Amino acid sequence: MTHLTIAIDGPASSGKSTVAKLLAGQLGITYIDTGAMYRAVTLAAQRQGVSVEDQLALENLLAQLDLSFRRQDGVQHVYLGEEDVSSAIRSVAVTQAVSEVSAQPLVREALVAMQQAMAAKESVVMDGRDIGTVVLPNASIKFFFVADVAVRAARRYKENIERGMTDQTLAEIEADIEARDLYDSTREHSPLKQAEDAILVDTSHETLDSLLAKLTEMIQKRM
């Protein structure tokens, strides 16, 4: 089989992770959730009381970080050491802090190196904010997802309710997403932007089935 590297970038709740997981399953290749990696670093920093302003402490945290993905019953779980943190990294506290942590050059350099090593070993679908521009600039195919803010907020609100997280209103989530969009697109290090050779995909009003069918057809033409 051809060594495939599929990059999916886009802002928060644009559908990247949902589509990336399903695509990977259809193609029989590995899904790498880079957002979960940044969330895991954020969680570890919060637990250890490490401030992003303390570069030495941040460097030590990254050096000792034991981050891994494990598949259980067909679902990918995120681990810090031997602890499954898949739910903990989706908390409101982590969600509100992850942009600031992921903007740190130290953090990005460490995780980008890890992500590139994963993609060199096997075919992958990888989603994030700088996959097509920084992590996998020579990816087999690149997509850039966009969606209306109101649609994205409704998706995040629904996900939170399903996880039993009811401490944020829809309006608060929409405000958070708008703030994160601004931060992610204007940060100095690896800002969120569409790669020149990425295919723009508006997921606002697409059904999951139609979106998967379109993307799968485009990918198969590259294989």
Image (cartoon, rainbow, N blue to C red):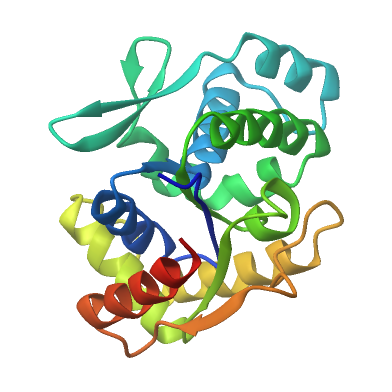
On the question of residue 131 being in view, the answer is: yes
- Residue shown at 72% from the left, 70% from the top: 195
Depth check: give the residue in front, 100 or 211.
211
Q: Residue at x 43, y 67 (%)?
A: 219
Q: Is residue 111 above or below residue 223?
A: above
Q: Is residue 177 or residue 132 the one in the foreground?
A: 132
For image coordinates 65% across by 35% down, the residue present is: 116
Please give left or right for residue 206 compared with residue 140 in the image.
left
Quadrant hosting residue 69: top left
The x, y position of residue 223, in whole percent, is 45, 60
108 displayed left or right of 42: right
Q: Is 218 located above or below residue 183 in the figure?
A: below
* Rendering coords of residue 48 (x, y %): 58, 17
Task: Give whichever of 112, 57 is nearer the camera.
Answer: 112
Residue occupying the point 31% across, 72% down: 155
Q: Quadrant of the N terminus?
A: top left
Give the farthest residue toward the left. 73
- Report whether residue 169 is seen: no
